Amino acid sequence: MLEAKLAYYQQHEHNKCVLFVRQDRVGADQHDRQGDGTWQARALTTLEAPLTFPGIGSVGRLGDLYKFTPLDPFARA
């Protein structure tokens, strides 16, 4: 299912990045379009992993995406 979505998003010529965020645990897979049109994947696995997008730059950390969710790493028990 994710492979089909990834292929769909990669078909759009103006799309420079695809980010799949995990819902069952902290983590994400980022796919960035390279200058030659190929795609490079990287796994984000730590709370401190920077969220950096082509053409935008840094927008925060992976842990920030989980704020106010059951996986919030900063929530008090």
Image: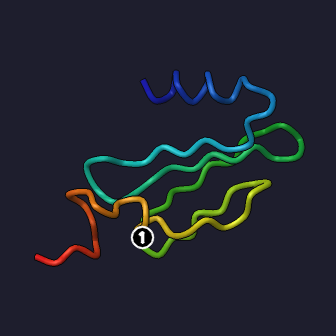
Residue occupying image coordinates x 57% and y 50%? 30
Side of 33 where 42 appears, left or right: left
Q: Quadrant of residue 53?
A: bottom right
> Above or below — where is 45 with respect to 35?
below
Residue type at the position of mark 1: Thr
For disc 1, the marked residue is 46
Q: Position of residue 70 (x, y in %)?
A: 20, 57
Numbered label tally: 1
The residue positioned 88% from the left and 46% from the top of the image is 35
Q: Is residue 24 left or right of residue 7?
A: left
* Rendering coords of residue 15 (x, y %): 73, 36
- Residue 32, given in percent of the width and then of the height, sits at 70, 47
Location of the N terminus (image quadrant): top left
Residue 63 in the figure: left or right of residue 36: left
Who is closer to the viewer here, 63 or 24? 63
Q: Residue furthest left?
A: 77
Q: Residues within 10 Å of mark 1 (few under 14, many from 20)?
A: few
Residue occupying image coordinates x 74% and y 42%: 16
Helix, strand, or loop for circle 1?
loop
Q: Which residue sits at x=63%, y=28%? A: 9
